[in-house]
DNA sequence: CCAAAAGTGTTTCCAATACACCCATGC
DNA sequence: GCATGGGTGTATTGGAAACACTTTTGG
């Protein structure tokens, strides 16, 4: 029922952090943005970009700020995932993490090397390095959410550049679902949903029939 | 990325609470359990049962404890919903609430009057009294989740007693979805899913054809 | 015999699936 | 002309939705 006093400092309670699971697709692999910790009990392990929630910002704002500060990424699909609060999730002290998940199109900021003295890199979700805290669990949770959402929303738009081929789009589905899909049925469904429209352009210079370029008719999250 | 110090007290941050949206169905209405606040800035308003998360318990444990302490209810479907963290959500100070939603079968503890000096009552979700904090928003969010989940899981089991008629079950769906459903199609679907099985008993003493009693074949959350 | 809710089948339609070949280009 | 990926259509199936009458009981 909220808190019991004027000040939130009187009562002993968990610290509140946000962590962001930022996905992209590169070379037909689902990647997640991770930072290598270079001090503390988790030194050498990798962690999601995250940080404490400030006293005057909302959870969404905190997640947005953290992504911008740590990965220089703004204006993307960002959605609250789940809150993790096992008392043992951080050996340094009691904390609750509100996890977010976010998607960015392929090549944007693909090469990040260090920031704040931390190594920062896109890691293959199916081959994670040793993880700090409960961040492996958080990533697995995010991956499940992504897999579910690609089926009944148009979030795929946030993983592709403005213009793309239907094969590009199909690859996104295949990587996230972890299985192949039938080309004809896929195109039939996508086109009948009206998610995308032709740009009129094609890709040239490849040793095969040029592919048409499409764009998303709407770049907002939509349930289908 | 967690917290920065050994103690979670050094840093100024939000308090962490859990609030539980507890639903039941009574007289063909969806009801939510609320408590009337009798002091503080929200005096006279109604609020969800909730409380601060203790330093040594997980979020799930906190939710379970709060429901048990405030409503004397245990052993039910309980699921994390969403975390609410608008800096203005509680005028008394900064707090983050991790909301849970839970379902109880119809008559269990239906009559609750006061507890800890608070009036406590089941209120019609479609006709809420003046609410404290952002609890109206939380309830609306929970209602949407419930509506979605009844479609693709068997959670309905947690709203009905051990034995029930197919009409009872249909009423649950109708109340939650807010619309009528076709009796023949409903029975066809439910029976073909194998969610329920006949008990062999019937209801007697009503001035019409006696209804068969069913039970759920599984009393665990299942996706269908 | 009447009121009331229980129970039951068929048809229609659409969406999902399975499946194989021709097309346009670069080299 | 050949290798490469782009692009297309049809038949089948299963589930969802629409729809109305008979059955069993208590009073």
Image (tube, coloured by chain):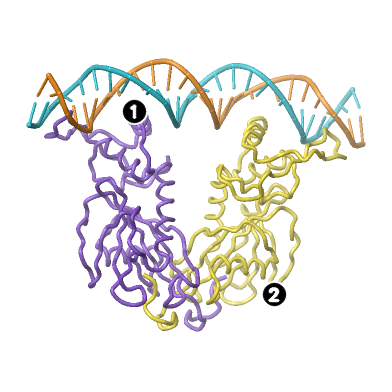
Chain colours: A purple, B yellow, C cyan, D orange
Q: Residue, x 67% and y 60% (percent of image)?
A: B75
Q: Return the x and y of residue A104 as percentages of the image width and height.
A: 29, 52
Task: Name the quarter where the N terminus of chain A is drawn.
Answer: bottom right
Q: Return the x and y of residue B95 as percentages of the image width and height.
A: 48, 72
Closest to the observer, B25 or B45: B25
In the picture of the structure, the residue carrying the numbered disc 1 is: A184
In the rendered view, would you say A107 is above or below A3?
Answer: above
Q: CA distance from mark 1 to mark 2?
A: 64 Å
Task: Name the quarter where the C terminus of chain A is drawn.
Answer: top left
Q: Return the x and y of residue A202 as percentages of the image width and height.
A: 17, 33
Quick one: SS at disc 2? loop
In the picture of the structure, the residue carrying the numbered disc 2 is: B116
Q: Which mark is residue B143?
A: none
Q: Residue, x 82% and y 40% (percent of image)?
A: B203
Q: Residues within 10 Å of mark 2 (few under 14, many from 20)?
A: few
Q: Is residue B162 left or right of residue B203?
A: left
Pointer 1 and pointer 2 on the same chain = no
Instruction: Report which quarter residue A93 is drawn in.
Output: bottom left
In the rendered view, would you say B11 is above or below A123?
Answer: below
Circles 1 and 2: CB atoms closer than 8 Å: no
Q: Return the x and y of residue B58 as percentages of the image width and height.
A: 54, 69
In this view, the mark in front (1 or 2): 1
Q: Residues within 10 Å of mark 1 (few under 14, many from 20)?
A: few
Q: Is residue B85 left or right of residue A167?
A: right
In the rendered view, would you say A103 is above or below A8?
Answer: above
Q: Residue, x 65% and y 68% (percent of image)?
A: B36
């Amino acid at each position: 029922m909220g808190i019991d006093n004027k000040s939130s400092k009187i009562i002993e309670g968990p610290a509140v952090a946000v962590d962001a699971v930022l996905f992209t697709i590169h070379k037909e692999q689902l990647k997640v943005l991770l930072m290598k910790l270079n001090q503390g009990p988790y030194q050498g392990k990798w962690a999601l970009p995250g940080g404490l929630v400030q006293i005057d910002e909302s959870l969404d704002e905190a997640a947005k700020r953290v992504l911008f500060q740590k990965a220089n990424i703004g204006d993307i699909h960002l959605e609250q995932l789940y809150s993790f609060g096992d008392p043992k999730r951080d050996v340094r002290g009691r904390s609750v993490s509100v996890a977010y998940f976010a998607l960015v199109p392929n090549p944007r900021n693909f090469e990040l090397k260090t920031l704040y003295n931390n190594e920062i890199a896109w890691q293959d979700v199916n081959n994670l390095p040793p993880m700090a805290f409960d961040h492996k669990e958080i990533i697995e949770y995010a991956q499940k959410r992504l897999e579910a959402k690609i089926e009944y929303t148009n979030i795929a738009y946030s993983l592709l550049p403005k213009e793309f081929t239907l094969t590009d789009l199909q690859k996104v589905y295949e990587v996230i679902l972890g299985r192949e899909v039938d080309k004809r049925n896929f195109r039939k469904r996508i086109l009948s949903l009206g998610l995308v429209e032709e740009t009129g352009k094609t890709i040239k210079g490849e040793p095969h029939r040029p592919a048409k370029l499409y764009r998303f008719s709407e770049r907002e999250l939509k349930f289908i």
